[in-house]
Amino acid sequence: MELLFTQAVPEDAQALCELFLRYSRELENYEMEYTLIEPTLLGSIQSRIKSRVTLAAVARDGDRVVGFLFCNISRLSGYSYEGSPLFGYISDTYVLPEYRGRHVAARLNEMACQWLKENDVGYVELKVLESNHNAHRFWSAQGYNPTTRVYGMKLK
């Protein structure tokens, strides 16, 4: 069956929650510093789906959501990129393991880039955990370049 790539609809929220939980557990393997607050997840995903400045893109195999990408439009404060104060930020991307290697994430990224262009955004960025080498290779293959190194420190 051909995969379908669309914007998420409110009826996708529960399936996205289940995928997001899998995504969060997988990030723990890469020493993710944050802990998911599960009771707030459904509301957060519902808000993202409704937001005009967020793209909640999904890949579907029939009725099943098999991957997602969340992308926001933000405004630079005091800066611009080629005359625009807007920039895109891909905050989360996940594809079920059995669908990896089938260009699902690449198609979701293409969808996000097209959406950003339609909204007059000329630059997009994202963060990748230092130890997630597969993600580094994937995003580099999509044309992204490392631009900044983010440092973190536990305060407790």
Image (cartoon, rainbow, N blue to C red):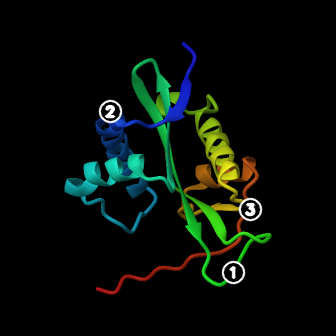
The mark closer to the camera, 2 or 3, is: 2
**Residue at the image position 37 percent from the left and 82 percent from the top:** 154
Q: Residue at x 40, y 46 (%)?
A: 49
Tag 1's secondary structure?
Answer: loop
Q: Amino acid at mark 3?
A: Asn
Q: Earlier in the sequence, mark 1 or mark 2?
A: 2
**Percent from the top left, x then y, of residue 109?**
63, 44
Query: Mark 3 highlights which residue?
Result: 145
Alpha-carbon distance for marks 2 and 3? Answer: 35 Å
Res 80 quadrant in image: bottom right
Q: Earlier in the sequence, mark 3 or mark 1?
A: 1
The residue at which mark 2 appears reads as 11
**Rendering quarter of residue 149:** bottom right
Name the one closer to the observer, 17 or 103: 17
Q: Is residue 58 above or below residue 33?
A: above
For the C terminus, which image quadrant? bottom left
Spatial CA distance of label 1 from label 2 is: 38 Å
